[in-house]
Image (spheres, rainbow, N blue to C red):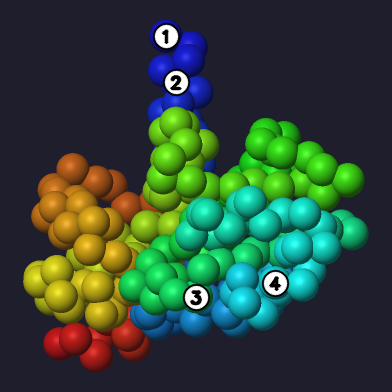
Amino acid sequence: MEKYFDYYDNKRTAYQKALEILYRYKISKLPINISRLCSLMKVRLGSYKIFENLIVSLRLENFMINDGFTAIINDSYYTFFNSDKTERRHLTISHELGHIAMGHLETENLACMDGVTVWNRSDKAEPSDLEMFANIFASTLLAPDCVLYDTNINTQKKLMEVTGLDNEESEKKLIHLKSFNHNHSITFLEKAVYYNFRDFIQSFE
Ligand SMILES: [Zn+2]
């Protein structure tokens, strides 16, 4: 039972953390500028191509089978991503920001080599709760329900275009948005995020 509540709390934390970041950095339109957000969060962002020399010199090249991964190098966060996967770029980077924002690198790192802490992501890896929490974070950051439910976006194509979600996540989000209105009491944080996005929301009217 206790485990169930931990799990439920963590899902809620992932959702809250994403809203906190939207609010704190005064993000007011979609798709969010992910490179700018990384720089605000002091995360160094670069493609595998750009950082190839660094990645190889730290012997992290095996992690490049993932769409993205994050490392702490000399006390700085680095998020590396596969720039060939353009459709997933926003989602991959946001997912990595989720691991950072939720402190996963500090407590749950998968690999620690030569003082470099690495968090990776692999479709081949066992699905883990932490990966799911990072996905909830990413889906909320890119496509906050409390903003989208008040726009008239109702096709998957439009949702992908506006948010940067991929095919799979946008399909889930559309279903989720339909239920958002009915069984949800709006929190203060959701209201605050909504307020920052009000011009963006109005542009859909
Ligand atoms: Zn991950």
Residue at 72 percent across and 54 percent down: it is 60
Sequence order check, earlier mark of 2 and 3: 2
Closer to the camera in the image, 83 or 41? 83
Please state which amino acid type lies under the numbered disc 4: Glu
Q: Earlier in the sequence, mark 2 or mark 4?
A: 2
Badge 2 amino acid: Phe
Residue at mark 2 to residue at mark 4: CA–CA distance: 42 Å
> Percent from the top left, x then y, of residue 112?
78, 40
Q: Quadrant of the N terminus?
A: top left
Read off the residue under disc 3.
Answer: 83
Could you tell me residue 46's position as x and y percent? Answer: 64, 75
Which residue in the protein does label 1 denote? 1
Q: Nearer the viewer, residue 20 or 11?
A: 11
Q: Amino acid at mark 3?
A: Ser
Quarter holding the C terminus? bottom left
- Disc 2/disc 3 C-alpha distance (Å): 38 Å
Above or below 31: residue 177 = above
Q: Which mark is residue 52?
A: 4
